[in-house]
Image (spheres, helix red, strand yellow):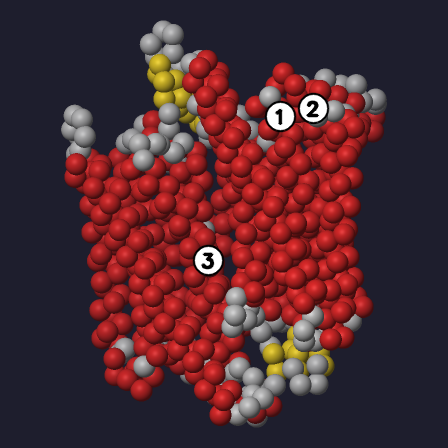
Amino acid sequence: MSAGVSANGTEVMADVHPCYVIDGSDYVLARSPSAGCSLLYAFLALASLVVVCGNLLVTIAVVYFKQLHTPTNSLILSLAVADLLVGVVVFPFSMAFSLSLCVRHEGLLCKVRGSLDVSLSTCSILHLCCISVDRYHAVCRPLTYRSTINRRVAAAMTLGSWGVSSLIGVGVTVAGLNECEGKCLVALLMDNTVGPLLSFYLPVVAMLCIYAKIFLVATKQARRVHNAKPGATASRAERKATRTLAVVLGAFLLCWTPFFLCITFLPLAGASAPVSVVEALNWFTLSNSMLNPFIYAFFYSWFRSALKIIVSGQILRGDFANSKLLPGKMAGGGDPANRSHVDDTHPCYQINVVSFTVKKTPSTMCALLYIFLSSVSAVTVCGNLLVITSIVYFKQLHTPTNSLILSLAVADLLVGLLVFPLNMEYSAQLCFYHADLLCKVRESLDVTLSTASILNLCCVSIDRYYAVCRPLTYRAKVNVHVAATMIVATWCTAVLVAVGFLVAGLNFDQCREGCLFGVVLANVLGPVFSFYLPVLVMVGIYLKIFLVARRQARSLRSADARKAEGKATRTLAIVMGGFLLCWLPFFLCFSSQLLDGVAVPHQAFETLNWLALFNSMLNPFIYAFFYSWFRSAFKMILTGKIVKSDFTNSRLF
């Protein structure tokens, strides 16, 4: 965190955390928490609860059911214990003693929090590496797998992971306790070199090499099967392995890479990342402990079977420890030959891939999934409806900037009202096998409204560029007519992209092969105009805004200027972080189809598509809830004041 010296010689610090304020020389919790602070802590508490519940279910399932007492599952069990401790210990400690607070007041509890964070996070990463080693021997050396990876080897890997992570956590803490004048070589090497190298870079290189080898071996095996039996399709196991590998590496790198790149290379370049950015990236890495039980357990049918028995309370009413959970070994499981034609990866229905018939199979997971998606849809609608009501009702908010935010809120509102329900009823997996008119309508609305949302975000970034970097000409450059032109162009481009995508899909249904126009339009031009060009514009613009704001703050050298710089840094980090987190995985997955021989499973598409749609829920929080004028309007709307009297001319800022 950048700190400076005020006119009277006292140290000042930017107010970079929504729950802390500067009280004289102290950095303390605010007496009256803001709406942003309450929302942040509610979200983190919910994330902690999901981490604990998910990993607790994995732990109970592996410990209780004897069929799951295998070397592979012992590694997954140890991983679940590490992630469970992250949710039970690290999340609450990091909420009570945040990085922003510990930079200012580094006490014993801050040391404990840092040590636990490093130890358990490193332990989780090393377990992921050990599981990749196990998968390598299972896929690439199946004949010697049982003799190579036995219980003793699994126990040794487990003890090694916990031992190494404990040493790294203690080493980082001891290096931080050593107080010295000038440069502390040991602390510098431990924090920026040895620690990240052992905690992340070596494990990630090992995982990349191992999973690349697994993918090549699986692909080679599939080609041998295809050559031996012309016309045969890739096995279900191969498709599942490809999907799992993509999800495993994608989630792991997405969560961990930004944080370690930030703490490793910025100090080497002589720069220091703002504490708010480091803290946000640290929370982002901890979210990997929430994803691990879904990736390594929820994708497997044995865990779904165990989950049903645990959640329904059957393990309390009888002895189910010897239950058969693995596919093909369950009592009454049916003929495996018939089951090979059934795609049952979706929790709400089964699809016969030969006859393309759909059989609904509602389950506890299905009900939980639909409840969760319905809740997200309701939050999306309510949040964007509040933004629309505020801007339309209060005359002070009738500005070109807010007209762009209004257009963005309308697009996101329609996503919540139309795209969410249609995607729940006609999922991507269902439409892959059983495409009809409503699937085409769903796809067209999805592309139109999602593209409109992204392009509106791009227009907002252009508006912010002129407001910050060219304030003298801002009112002349960005007026009502220019804003209206950007809005019309945004919606027209979104509609054209969607229509082109739909026409290309219809043509492809007719010609199947050799549809060059459809391939180029759907896989190249569509993503370029919908995502890649807007994201390049946004990254360039926000980088320019950050540099200009930082230069202006340094020239002013005042506490208010530094506070504004901290707020601008936090806002830009959240804007780009939220946007890229939601949209980048989907479009990278979509574009990877252009690579020869790469087939992305439709289940992965559906998951990433839902993640992208969640951006419509985040936008009202990022672009509206962070501003004081919206909070004032929000209070008036919720208290019903606008119904009782005329407040259209109220002063909100």
Any part of residue 74 in sight: no
Could you give the CA–CA distance between mark 2 and mark 1, rounded to whole angstroms? 8 Å
Q: Mark 1 Cα within 10 Å, few/some/many (few <14, many 20+)?
A: some
Q: Mark 3 Cα within 10 Å, few/some/many (few <14, many 20+)?
A: some
Which of 581 and 485 lies nearest the eye of the viewer?
485
- Point out the tag, 2 or 1, that comes first from the N-terminus: 1
Residue at which label 3 appears? 251
Any part of residue 446 in sight: yes
Residue 466's disc is 1
Residue at x 55%, y 71% (from the top left corner): 599
Which of 104 and 233 lies nearest the eye of the viewer?
233
Residue at x 49%, y 44% (from the top left corner): 44
Residue at x 22%, y 38% (from the top left corner): 188
Q: Percent position (x, y) of residue 150?
A: 26, 78
Quarter of the view holding residue 81: bottom left
Q: Percent position (x, y) of residue 6?
A: 38, 11
Say whether marks 2 and 1 touch (CB < 8 Å).
yes
Q: Mark 2 Cα within 10 Å, few/some/many (few <14, many 20+)?
A: some
Q: Percent position (x, y) of residue 189?
A: 20, 41
- Which quadrant is the C terminus positioned in? top right
Could you give the CA–CA distance between mark 1 and mark 3, rounded to whole angstroms? 36 Å
Could you give the CA–CA distance between mark 3 and mark 2, rounded to whole angstroms? 42 Å
Q: Secondary structure at mark 3?
A: helix
Which of 525 and 653 lies nearest the eye of the viewer?
525
Residue 247's disc is none
Residue at which label 2 appears? 477
Q: Is residue 540 left or right of residue 372?
A: left
Q: Secondary structure at mark 1?
A: helix
Q: Amino acid at mark 2?
A: Lys
Q: Percent position (x, y) of residue 21?
A: 46, 23
- Point out the tag, 1 or 3, that comes first from the N-terminus: 3
